[in-house]
Image (cartoon, helix red, strand yellow):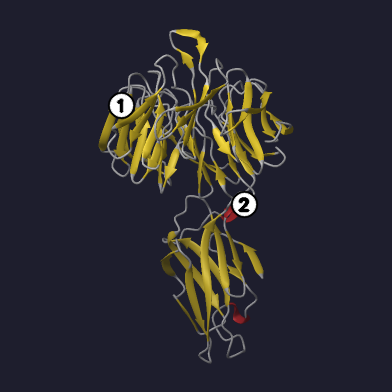
């Protein structure tokens, strides 16, 4: 095996006679000895984030984030007399490309060339105050930190192809290299802040802002593809599926737009604002909460109402519902007219809207639930994280961490959650809540909800992310 780090016009090469194509002194020689990628116009890739590994029958290339896999020029040398495709050809490497090297005696050898992005593993991403952190998920050690000009506590991150996308109260949407924190781009979405989670689908980032606009941004450049203006701020997470972006606005309407063009497909009128409650989508049905005191269930195809759950007394505007095994879990917030009356944690039949169980009465919830391994977890305004059995609602354990609205995530057999009020980010044992580690965040009273890439590279999103159901 040969591993080579390279960039620009430098090549990754073996010690081939003459340094170029030829038989290397043996008529059957047919090896790829060097391989280099540039953009189609010949400009080099960032050397620190570009590597080539040539083995006996393959070439594996890691390219920097936000470099398109298609339209790359491959320059290579071999010990054979020819190679197909030819060196210098611009190709689409979205899927592996086969290179056939022919020796002077006519025999051939095929190499499989694949181009990918670095894949960080076992890492937690979270915002706390004006800082955005990447932590080692096993130990809590700092991997990198970005210091911004506004709070990252209101918008949870999303991930694709070694890029983290996240919004800030400074009104910018940021794209970071997930491996090292390098700022790739930022886009100013209005002037009054971004609380909506930035959700990516294919090559577009969808995010709302407090200037009443939903943006569709080019994920590579950060420039708008289209925008859609509502009648009030958009704080909830968009949900993107089947070419449609769904989201609620504080103008009391829930929207379905064509994800490619931003054209309105349908809208639904709720009884009051739709604030932080992002929609979940399961089996063609949408679920979201509103200040009108109800969780709404709509047909995703046309926006027609299936059922409403609630009494009209407790607002559901702060918690995004999570759907699992035919049950919708959501936290109730407060009675807007009397903040001494707080909501409970509810399990609701997804098909009928009937109550399955109600627990943690008079707690108040401004976070979203997460379901894993027969457990449902949520943080509440009782300053605790609570873990319950999904089937019965029986409380398995509780722990005081002063979460201040951070939603929990479970990955690697660990629960991760922010404790802004206590000044820490926590990793907890899911069986009993025992601390595995905690990371200090200084004077930040709030954190976002964590995003975790686990040991196998699977991304676990919080329930308020617009990605999980």
The residue lying at 70 percent from left, 31 percent from top is 433
Residue 299: quarter of image: top left
Sequence order check, earlier mark of 1 and 2? 1
Q: Residue 427 in the image: x percent, y percent?
A: 68, 34
Q: Please give the residue where the numbered disc 2 appears in the rendered image.
A: 456
> For the residue labelled by badge 2, is the local secondary structure a helix, a strand or a loop?
loop
Q: Residue at x 55, y 45 (%)?
A: 459
- Of discs 1 and 2, which sits in the foreground? 2
Q: Nearer the viewer, residue 462 or 14?
A: 462
The tag on residue 299 is none
How packed mark 2 is, by other alpha carbons closer than 10 Å (few <14, some 14-19, many 20 or more), is few
In this rendering, the answer to whether 161 lies above or below 312 is below
Quadrant where the image shows the N terminus: bottom right
From where the camera sits, is residue 92 visible? yes
Residue at image position (45%, 58%) is 69
Q: Mark 1 = which residue?
A: 230
């Amino acid at each position: 095996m040969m591993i080579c780090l390279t960039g620009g016009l430098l090549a990754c090469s073996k010690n081939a006679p003459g340094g170029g194509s030829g038989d290397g002194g043996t008529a059957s020689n047919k090896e790829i000895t060097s391989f280099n990628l540039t953009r189609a116009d010949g400009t080099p890739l960032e050397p620190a984030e570009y590597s080539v590994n040539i083995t006996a029958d393959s070439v594996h290339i890691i390219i920097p984030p936000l470099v398109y896999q298609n339209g790359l020029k491959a320059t290579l040398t071999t010990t054979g007399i020819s190679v197909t495709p030819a060196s210098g050809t611009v190709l689409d490497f979205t899927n592996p490309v086969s290179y056939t090297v022919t020796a002077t005696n006519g025999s051939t050898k095929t190499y499989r060339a694949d181009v990918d992005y670095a894949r960080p593993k076992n890492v937690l991403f979270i915002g706390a105050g004006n800082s955005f952190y990447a932590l080692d998920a096993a130990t809590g050690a700092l991997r990198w930190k970005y210091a911004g000009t506004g709070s990252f506590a209101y918008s949870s991150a999303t991930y694709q192809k070694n890029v983290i996308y996240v919004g800030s109260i400074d009104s910018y949407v940021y794209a970071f290299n997930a491996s090292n924190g390098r700022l790739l781009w930022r886009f100013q979405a209005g002037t009054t802040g971004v609380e909506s989670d930035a959700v990516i689908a294919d090559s577009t980032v969808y995010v709302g802002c407090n200037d009443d606009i939903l943006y569709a941004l080019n994920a590579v450049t950060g420039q708008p593809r289209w925008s859609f203006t509502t009648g009030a701020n958009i704080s909830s997470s968009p949900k993107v599926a089947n070419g449609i972006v769904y989201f609620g606005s504080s103008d009391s309407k829930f929207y379905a737009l064509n994800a490619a063009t931003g054209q309105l497909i349908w809208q639904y009128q709720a009884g009051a604002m739709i604030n932080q409650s992002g929609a979940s989508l399961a089996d063609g049905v949408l679920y979201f909460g509103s200040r009108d005191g109800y969780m709404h269930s709509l047909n995703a195809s046309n926006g027609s109402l299936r059922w409403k759950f609630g009494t009209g007394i407790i607002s559901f505007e702060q918690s995004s519902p999570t759907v699992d095994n035919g049950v919708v879990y959501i936290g109730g917030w407060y009675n807007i007219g009397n903040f001494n009356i707080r909501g409970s944690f509810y399990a609701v039949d997804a098909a009928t809207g009937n109550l399955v169980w109600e627990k943690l009465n008079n707690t108040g919830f401004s976070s979203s639930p997460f379901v894993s391994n027969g457990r449902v977890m949520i943080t509440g305004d009782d300053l605790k994280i609570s873990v319950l059995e999904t089937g019965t609602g029986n409380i398995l354990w509780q722990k005081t961490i002063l979460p201040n609205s951070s939603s929990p995530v479970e990955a690697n057999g660990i629960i991760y959650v922010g404790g802004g009020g206590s000044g820490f980010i926590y990793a907890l044992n899911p069986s009993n809540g025992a601390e595995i580690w905690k990371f200090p965040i200084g004077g930040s009273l709030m954190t976002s909800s964590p995003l975790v890439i686990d040991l196998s590279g699977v991304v676990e999103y919080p329930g308020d992310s617009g990605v999980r159901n």
